[in-house]
Amino acid sequence: MTTATAIHLEMRGFIPNNPRLPLVVYDAAFPSDTVDLAAQMEKRFAANGWPPQWRNGIYDYDHYHTQGHEVLGIAAGSATLVLGGEGGRCIEVSAGDVLLLPVGTGHRCVRHSDDFLVIGAYPPGQVPDIVLKAATPAMLNQIAVLSFPASDPVHGADGPLSKLWADQVVRGR
């Protein structure tokens, strides 16, 4: 099974991040030389209850979502991302990596290769609203109560998400 690393982020600037759920980085979740990696990611995410909704890059400005947890599959190329807002965590990603961002997590791309391609997916009924300002009390409540995904987007029901997030949800109650 792919190594999954949990990263906890605190509120930073206008980015709320998620006070309970860590973002999860799956290094080399898919072999980078997979034929039609984008299609393979879409197929796996869909099979695990995360229907893909777009193919593109990642915006070059800090933003977050209040209405959806987001999985980002790096289908081609490489990039440097900042997670968590201004002064946040800087990471390098490349084809085959997957990021799972809990609702409220800030993210932006600061550099990418010409062939950079990302697959974006969300649990059913959740959407990628794009927020560029401080969260209101209502938005913070939405982040706190958003439904928990049924399974890990990469590994399904028994994947690392069930442990990494479930432990945090239980502790947060």
Image: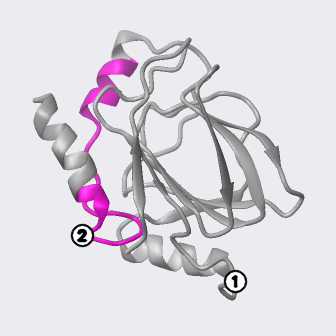
Displayed quadrant of residue 170: top left
Whether 71 is drawn above or below 88: the answer is below
Residue wearing tag 2: 157
Q: Nearest to the eye among marks 2 and 1: give it.
A: 1
Residue at 39% x, 33% y is: 8
Is-magenta flag for residue 94? no
Q: Secondary structure at mark 2?
A: loop
Whether 45 is drawn above or below 136: the answer is below
Question: Quadrant where the C terminus lies?
Answer: top left
Q: Is residue 44 left or right of residue 33?
A: left
Is-magenta flag for residue 161? yes
Residue 85: x and y, percent?
Answer: 59, 24
Which mark identifies residue 33? 1
> Nearest the camera: 1 or 124?
1
Q: Is residue 75 left or right of residue 167?
A: right
Residue 6: x and y, percent?
Answer: 38, 46
Displayed quadrant of residue 72: bottom right
Mark 2 / mark 1, whichever is N-terminal: 1
Which amino acid type corresponds to the residue marked 1 in the rendered image? Asp
Which mark identifies residue 54? none
> Nearest the camera: 148 or 168?
168
Density class for disc 1 (Cα within 10 Å; few <14, some 14-19, many ≥20) is few
Q: Secondary structure at mark 1?
A: loop
Residue at 28% x, 31% y is: 20
Which amino acid type corresponds to the residue marked 2 in the rendered image? Ala
Question: Quadrant where the N terminus lies?
Answer: bottom left
Q: Is residue 118 left or right of residue 69?
A: right
In this orientation, does residue 148 appear? Answer: no
Magenta residues, start to end: 139-162
Whether 74 is drawn above or below 31: the answer is above
Residue 109: x and y, percent?
Answer: 73, 40
> Nearest the camera: 49 or 93?
93
